[in-house]
Every structure is written in structure tokens, then in C-alpha cells.
Amino acid sequence: MTPPTTTAGTTAGPAPGAAPTESTLHDDPRFRELKRRFRRFAFPVTTVFLGWYLLYVLLCAYARDFMAHKISGNINVALVFGLGQFAATFLTAWIYSRYADRRLDPLSAELRATAAERAGVAA
């Protein structure tokens, strides 16, 4: 694949030495640690969240009597589960934000500074 060209016909892209190559960062043990931390959080949380959603869909499809059970007035189990989906989404986003602030962002900033230092660019 050829690099994109500008209107003047020159190739666009970073100046030589503007950024380290990807392989340089990928070989850094801190980068592998960053990926490991992200995966260690993201995969289990995603699995739980999708499982919760699938449970909701399956109950709506196959357990109609259970989902139609009235809890109070016009509020039934299906409505509570549906609102629980929204709550789970916001809760997941909040938990991830806190996790990223504590465990991912400091290491990412460190890697970014190292990469900029290697490239001779101010961070």
C-alpha cells in the first residue's frame, strides 16, 4: 500500500524520526504489561455484561410468564431487567473509568513519554 499524497504530490505522513516504530513499542515489556492489564479487565467484564444481556433476551423470549410477573403496580420483572441493562451499562463505564485512571493511564503516559523521548519529540 502506498502512502497518501498531498495536493503538491508529496507523500503525507510523519517526518522521519517523528515517532518510534510500532515494533519498538511492542517489544517494550511495559507495553505488554499494559495490554495484559487491559485484557485482564476487559475480557471478564465483557463476558459478564454480554451474559447478563443474553439472559435478559432469553428470559424475554422463553420465560414470558416470569418476565410478566407484576412486582408493584405496572412494574414487572421485564421492566426491572430492562432498566437494569441501562444501569449495568453506566456502572460498567464508571468502573472501567476508575480502573483505567488507576491501572492503565499511568503506564500509558509513561510509554508515551518514552516513545516521544526516543523520537526526539516533546511529550
Image: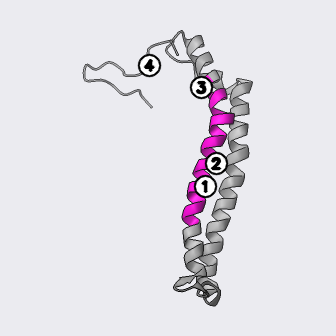
| Mark sitting earlier along the chain (1/3) | 3
Report how far apart the C-alphas of labels 1 and 2 lie in the structure.
Answer: 6 Å
Report how far apart the C-alphas of labels 3 and 2 lie in the structure.
Answer: 29 Å
Q: Residue at x 32, y 18 (%)?
A: 10
The amino acid sitting under disc 4 is: Pro
What segment carries the magenta color? Answer: 85-109
Q: Is 90 situated above or below 5?
A: below
Which secondary structure, mark 3? helix
- Closer to the camera: disc 4 or disc 1? 1
Quadrant the N terminus occupies: top left
| 36 in the magenta segment | no
Report how far apart the C-alphas of labels 4 and 1 lie in the structure.
Answer: 39 Å
- Residue extending furthest left? 7
Instruction: Choose top left, top right, bottom left or bottom right for residue 115.
Output: top right
Report how far apart the C-alphas of labels 1 and 3 lie in the structure.
Answer: 34 Å
| Mark sitting earlier along the chain (3/2) | 3
Q: Residue at x 69, y 58 (%)?
A: 47
The amino acid sitting under disc 2 is: Ile
Residue position for label 1: 91
